[in-house]
Each structure stands twice: as structure tokens, then as C-alpha cells.
Amino acid sequence: MKAVILAGGLGSRLSTNETDLPKPMTQIGNKPILWHIMKHYSEFGINQFVICAGYKGYAIKEYFLNYAAHASDIEIDILNTSVKILNQRTEPWKIQIIDTGLETMTGGRLKRIANYVDDEFCLTYGDGLANVDISGLLDSHRLSKSLVTVTAVHLPGRFGSLSISDKKVIDFQEKADNETAWVNGGFFVVDKKALSYVDSESTVWEREPLQRLAREGQLNAWIHEGFWLPMDTPRDLKELQRLWDTNEAPWKIWQ
């Protein structure tokens, strides 16, 4: 099974000193937030990733092209211009990094990677961390027989709100209008058939596709009461770094 990670946006709401990097490459504990997300999925046996790149996607490519060398001991034969990895300390990841365009919207990015995914895949954003139980999320999706399952979390008003009845999303709004709403937590399971709900590169996944899926009873909700924090502001980044530095990071479920 693959996990698709949306990592192509401009990330203009986050101001950091790392202006030469795309937002998913912003570091927490000397590792990009993208790496943290992938480590989380890996703990649930998901080691194949499709990264939807866009804004400065070359930085993501360069990071993973050099990842094994940076993470392991190496032997360099300068005369023969060869490199040998010694004591390899890398994850068993297979990563497809796909250029999905600079201005493409989230739905359009998914449409562009349709040929790289199987009939069922996980989906998340490249700028948020959580301790979501991916196994439970997958079980809920399969039992529901819905086309899409969205992780529902509680957070005040800046994220899309979900009206939930009997674990089905009956309405999806791009923005919440109160502080008690369930909101889009960004960890999805998607049946590939749901990509037919995306009309064009300008389609925003969180608007018409999810709204239509909700109206048709095809949007399942997986309730997550645990930790979830998107890296949307400098304050969010500071908090994620603090949690990591104090060994209190709830998303770190690996050894």
C-alpha cells in the first residue's frame, strides 16, 4: 500500500528562516517534517510513498537522493569515483517524487498521480503531525465501504468542518464556524474511484470533491481524539520543536 503526501504548495502562511526550502522540508529535530510523517506511516508497515511535489520540489528530490549517504557511514573511492554505503542506517522506503506543478490545486495534484497509486491508498498533507492509528483508520475505511475516509479532529475555526452522523460525514465545509466543530485532520484513505470527482487541475480536493462525496454518503469519518497539530504558523513550528526537544513528541511512535 502507498501513502500519498501533498507537498507542492507554497506554504506562504509559515514564515521561517528556511526560505530556500518548501514547507514540508522545514526541519524539526534536524529532520524535515516530511520525514517525520513518513516515519509514522512506516510504523504501520506502509513504506511506499508518492510525494506530490511542486514549489521547489528539487529540494525534496535532492534530500532523498542523498539520504542514504547522509544517514549512513560511507566509503569514497576518489580515484574510481565510486561511493559505497557502510553500515546502512536507512528505512526500507520506496519513494516516487512527482512534479505536480507549481500552481496546481490539491485535487489536481491527486489527479496527476493517479497512475502511480493502486485501487486504495492513504493520503495526507506534508505539513502536519499526529499520532493517528493508521491501522484503525484503514479498518474503519474498509468496514464503511465508502470511497473516502477522513480523520476527524477537534480544533478551533481555521480548518474545514465536518457534520458527522453515525460515523458518516453528511456535510463538509471548507471552514469551521465554531470552536466545537469536528475538522478535517488530513489523514485520509482514498479509493481510487474518488479521483473521478476531481474535474481539473484547479479543483480543490477539500471543496467540491469532498462536499459531493459527503452528499452522496461516500465520506466516512474516523474519529481521532489524540494529538494533532498542523505546522501552519511559526508558533506551531515552535511547539513541534519544543515537543521534540523535550522527548514529548506524541507522533514519535518509533524507536
Image (cartoon, helix red, strand yellow):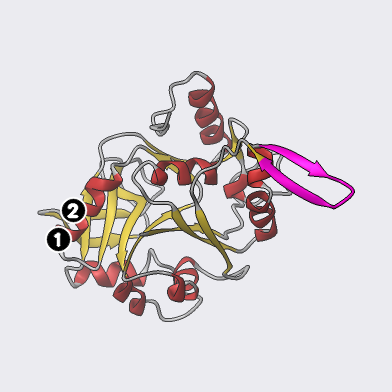
Examine the image and state in which quarter residue 160 appears: bottom left
Could you say which disc has been placed on residue 144 in the image?
Answer: 1
Residue count near mark 1 (Cα–Cα under 10 Å), binned few <14, some 14–19, many ≥20 = some
Identified by mark 1, the residue type is Ser
Q: Is the C terminus in the top left, top right, bottom left or bottom right quadrant?
A: top left
Q: Are marks 1 and 2 in contact (CB under 8 Å)?
A: yes
What residue range appears in magenta? 73-85
Q: Which of 61 and 85 is in front in this view?
A: 85
Residue depicted at x 59% and y 52% = 11
Asked if 75 appears above or below 246 in the picture, the reply is: below
Residue depicted at x 50% and y 56% = 94
* Element on which disc 2 rests: helix
Asked if 16 appears above or below 148 in the picture, the reply is: above
Place of residue 248 in the rendered image (x, y in percent of width and height, measured from the top left): 43, 22
Residue pointed to by mark 2: 140
Examine the image and state in which quarter residue 104 appears: bottom right
